[in-house]
Image: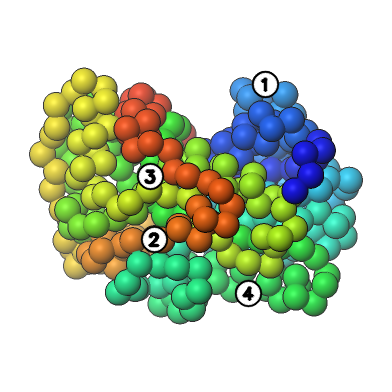
Amino acid sequence: MSDQTRTAVVVGAGPVGREAARVMTEQGHRVTVVTRSGRPTGIEGVASVAVDASDAGALEAVVRGADALLNCANPRDYTVWEQVWPPLAASLLTTAERTGATLVTAASLYPYGPVDAPMTEGMPDVATDHKGRLRARMWAEAKAAHDAGRLAAVEVRASDYLGAGVGLNGHVSRHVPAAARGRAAWMIGRPDLPHTFTDVADMGRTLARVAFDEGTWGQVWHAVSGPPSTQRAALDGALAALGRPAVAVHGLPVPLVRATGVVSPMMRELGQLGYVFERPYVMDSSRTQAALGLAPSPWEDTLRRTGEGNLSGSPAAAR
């Protein structure tokens, strides 16, 4: 991979978009972040532009001349995914094809659906819920366009996020403010099952690594992540890094979450993902580590950033 300066446009200024922008800027690349508000990211050297990324014409005007287009959008409200994602995904594909920018997508593990073994990149996308099927379809369409030579595309999938600024986007970080004040935490499913977490900083590093490396394109990669922990241990560790004692951690049975979904659309969406928290949920990133030369952040550093970087909570990710 060349060391020359490249240009990237990042769609989304949530924790993933900010980390990807920060890493690429530190590597000497020129980065513009696109959100509807155009609010500055606070990262030195990063430009901010107000654009509705679902408008292909408007997005193309910003992306024209860029080497990479990073899809780091993250509609946190699952209830709007079927309305928000299709036009946004179509706009990103159209823009990448028209401009020649490589489409780099930050994604989750939802396309795999329920699994009984550690997730690897070779597993089929057999999601059972509509959110997982939607994200699987997005990658299938991007991969088909890539294989047809219409554009270059690559996808990076990550597990649940830890790290600074994750806030409400993380199943552990969202509990930090209240737990730091001694309040018990109620976590979906069984809080002591093995569970992989991805440091948002490591997701940013993985995205930056594949963005300009032609040898990685046309493939799914797993964000470099450490060995599995548990929801309880991750929260305990984040609190310990703050010098705070552990709090009581209770599990919300998935059937109860699903029952609550009768009156709460968001709980209904979370109930569909109950498999993530009622069985071991382990992602294998060894291929990324070996092929791309990346190593996960030290666990203690991840826990420290999770504690210190989420004490006041975090607003919903901007798009």
From the top left corner, tell me how far across and down residue 115 is, in percent. Answer: 34, 73
Amino acid residing under circle 1: Glu
Q: Residues within 10 Å of mark 4 (few under 14, many from 20)?
A: few
Q: Residue at x 47, y 75 (%)?
A: 123
Q: Which residue is mark 2?
A: 283
Q: CA distance from mark 3 to mark 1?
A: 25 Å
Circles 3 and 1: CB distance less than 8 Å?
A: no
Is residue 13 visible in the rendered image? The answer is no
Amino acid residing under circle 2: Met
Among the two numbered marks 1 and 2 on one chain, the one whose residue lies closer to the N terminus: 1
Q: Nearer the viewer, residue 5 or 259?
A: 5
Mark 3: secondary structure: loop
Q: Which residue is mark 3?
A: 170
Q: CA distance from mark 4 to mark 3?
A: 26 Å
Dividing the picture into quadrants, the one containing residue 6 is: top right
Q: Which residue is mark 4?
A: 140
Q: Residue at x 56, y 48 (%)?
A: 293
